Each structure stands twice: as C-alpha cells, then as structure tokens.
Image (spheres, rainbow, N blue to C red):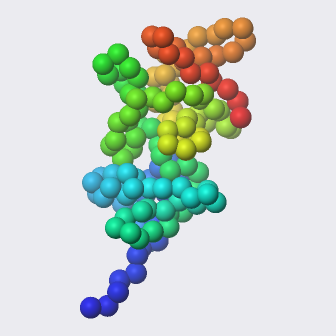
Amino acid sequence: MENLRAPELFIDKDGLWYADGVLMINKEIIKLFAANLKKDSHDKYHIDWQNQLYPVRVEDVPFFVQSVTEQVGQLTIQLNDGRKFPLPPGNIVMKNNIPYISLFWQRDTKLSRPSYSELCKNLIERNGQYFIKHGDNEWLVEDE
C-alpha cells in the first residue's frame, strides 16, 4: 500500500478549518484536530496525533468563540469546534477593534461579535478602564 500524503491544513481568520483548500464540515474531525492542536516554540502550530506531527497554517488565531452563555454561575465560551470552556481568567485584548482572549496560549482565541456583545452586557467602567464583570470575576478590556 502506498503512503498517503497528509492534507495541507489551514485555519482561516474566522476559525474555519480547511484541508487542501476545501472547507471541512465534519464537526467531529474538526473537534479531534482542534483538541490535538499544539504550538511549538517558534509559534507554529501542528496536530500531534499518534506520534506524528501534522503542520497547520493559521491565518490569525486557531480558536474562535462562537457563543458565550452562563452555565452553573460562570461564563462559558463555546468554540466553533463545539467544545465548551469556562471563560479563562486574564484580559480581553482589543486588536484592531477585535477582541482576543488567552485560552491555551497567549492571545490564541478570537471572540465573535455576538459573543463579545453578550459579554459587554456585563461591562463596567472604573477609573477610566473597562471590565467585564460577572459575580466576583472581572476581565479587563484593554487595547493591544
């Protein structure tokens, strides 16, 4: 049997996955790939699967928040790959009016407009700075 080449994997600026230029639509495969995505010391991404490394080109950041909800008293983000996580501690960084958070690595996750709008329902201002406040937790909103 011939060795098959691995597809060229790419994540666009909206967090959509492509294989050899074709949009991937199978959510289970996307979730598997995203769950095994790693970042090396040169800021390059790859999927680490069964002792093999498969490079992934990333246009902006690898993760994209589709929605924000409150679950069990905490803010929960849902990535476009379907996974859910508590909104991580740390700042929300605005770059060119686009909000980013740090989920696994520094500023690796972009918030969709609807998800950021949902967070801004809890926006407060204090001493000229803006925060998202939920319960006892606060996230500073800052410019890059």
- Report whether residue 27 is seen: yes
- Report whether residue 12 is seen: no
Indicate the quadrant containing the N terminus: top left, top right, bottom left or bottom right: bottom left
Indicate the quadrant containing the C terminus: top left, top right, bottom left or bottom right: top right
Residue 135 relative to residue 142: left or right: left
Up-down: is 55 above or below 127?
A: below
Residue 95 place in picture, x, y as percent: 67, 37
Question: Quarter-wise, where is residue 43 in the image?
Answer: bottom right
Q: Name the residue nearer the viewer: 51 or 94.
A: 51
Q: Name the residue nearer the viewer: 99 or 72.
A: 72
Q: Tell me what residue is drawn at x 61 percent, y 57 percent.
A: 41
Q: Tell me what residue is drawn at x 39 percent, y 56 percent.
A: 36
Q: Tell me what residue is drawn at x 59 percent, y 41 percent.
A: 107
Residue 72 relative to residue 59: left or right: left
Residue 68 place in picture, x, y as percent: 41, 28
Residue 110 place in picture, x, y as percent: 53, 40
Up-down: is 132 above or below 143?
A: above
Residue 73 relative to residue 128: left or right: left
Q: Tell me what residue is drawn at x 33 percent, y 43 percent.
A: 82
Residue 102 place in picture, x, y as percent: 55, 37
Q: How many marks?
A: 0
